[in-house]
Amino acid sequence: MRRRHFLGAIPLFAAAATSKVQRWSVITIGNLSRNRYWGEPDDKPFRAVICTCTLIIGDGFRLLVDPSLSAQADMAKELDRRTGLKPDDITAVFVTHEHADHVAGLEHFQKAVWYAAAPVAEILNRSAKLTRKLEPAPATLFGSVEVFPTPGHTQGHHSLRFDCEGKSIVVAGDAVATLDFWRERR
């Protein structure tokens, strides 16, 4: 059983002694189209939006979270630059929520299984913008990556938690945009 710690109102867990996750890497670092904390008004974008994309590698799986780059060559280049992998090396993709920047590169991973939490999969599958359907994700992917609800940014938003190298890691999608947003509980 994991020991429970609290930081403010957020439960944190000590990592399990053993984990099927071997390593994880950030593929792209997200940025907002505008940031109120830099004095940028909400009425116009200042830059193209991109989400953070993360790769989780474990026993028998390579799980990419929120493939963010719409240009196939750009997505392949960043995946190679950060990990040495090719798009066909990815076995599964997980989408945290239905916003366009989180599914922008999904089509580049045709050999992978596409997952999202059931409410997100339903929204995206109804949109008819994708060439195939997303599978509703189980509560745990590959016996080691927990899927859990983090509503707020969108109603169906889900995050992932796993243990790696003695730490408990959360891939939070847009549940927390920046530290400024976190501090203000936005």
Image (spheres, grey):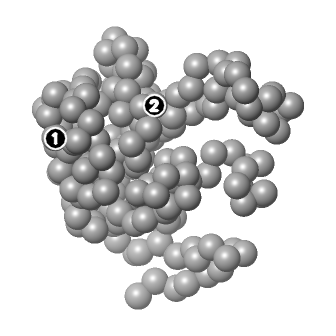
Give the quadrant of residue 18: bottom left
Q: What amino acid is labelled 1 in the image?
A: Lys
Residue toward you, 5 or 59: 5
Question: Could you tell me how far apart the alpha carbons at marks 2 and 1 are, in whole angstroms?
Answer: 18 Å
Residue 14, image x and y in percent? 52, 76
The C terminus lies in which quarter of the figure? bottom right
Query: How many other residues sit within 10 Å of disc 2, few (<14), some (14-19) or many (≥20)?
Result: many
Task: Determine which of the numbered discs, if any, sits on residue 133 in the image.
Answer: 1
- First along the sequence among labels 2 and 1: 2
Q: What amino acid is labelled 2 in the image?
A: Asp
Residue toward you, 133 or 95: 133
The N terminus lies in which quarter of the figure? bottom left
For label 2, the residue is 101
Task: Determine which of the numbered discs, if any, sits on residue 151 in the image.
Answer: none
- Compared to 14, does 62 lie above or below? above
- Compared to 19, does 64 lie above or below? above
Query: How many other residues sit within 10 Å of disc 1, few (<14), some (14-19) or many (≥20)?
Result: some
Tell me the SS state at disc 1.
loop
Residue 86, image x and y in percent? 26, 24
